[in-house]
Image (cartoon, rainbow, N blue to C red):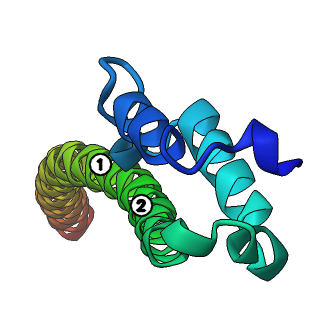
Amino acid sequence: MAQTDLPPGNLPREIIRFSLAPGASVLHGSAEPMSFLRGITSMMDKEALSTYNDDALEARALRSALTACITFGEQARRREEWCRHKAELEKSVKELIHDKDAALREVCKLEDALRQAELRLKEARDDGIAEGRAEAERVAAEERKQDAEDAEK
């Protein structure tokens, strides 16, 4: 870029005006302001800085400030991404906890149903044993009766 394109007196004010303009928040890492700042800092290489003569120190300070803004903006963008990722993870954890609680409730219901089935099975077995004993006693009684009848004859 030619020296006339970057007048030393106007450059800092333009950048300050841009960075402070509503909706042009450099600190939130939005793409357009970040691209603008990267473009300005890339133009301000050593050759371009040497053309400023009287404003060389101001230009170097401005470049350092712009680089810091870019770095801060990128850090803010990364923080936003991590916050978003953290929120997604927290949501997933809450869903898993909810699912875990629901699964535990279901397991408790199944355990209760299993206990009930075991009780019914035991009752059926006990009833079967009792019926078997009753049948055995009945058969034994009939056999005794038959033996008694046979003995009487």
Q: Residue at x 43, y 56 (%)?
A: 73
From where the camera sits, is residue 137 visible? yes
Disc 2, SS: helix
Q: Which mark is residue 122?
A: none
Indicate whether 70 appears above or below 68. Answer: above
Indicate whether 148 appears above or below 85. Answer: below
First of labels 2, 1 by sequence position = 2
Q: Which mark is residue 69?
A: 2
Relative image position of residue 67 (x, y in whole percent)? 52, 69
Indicate whether 130 appears above or below 7. Answer: below
Q: Quadrant of residue 4?
A: top right
**Residue type at mark 1?**
Ala
List the residue tagged with mark 1.
87
Indicate whether 41 appears above or below 18. Answer: below
Depth order, front residue of 138/9: 9
Relative image position of residue 152 (x, y in whole percent)? 15, 63
Quarter of the image where the C terminus is located: bottom left
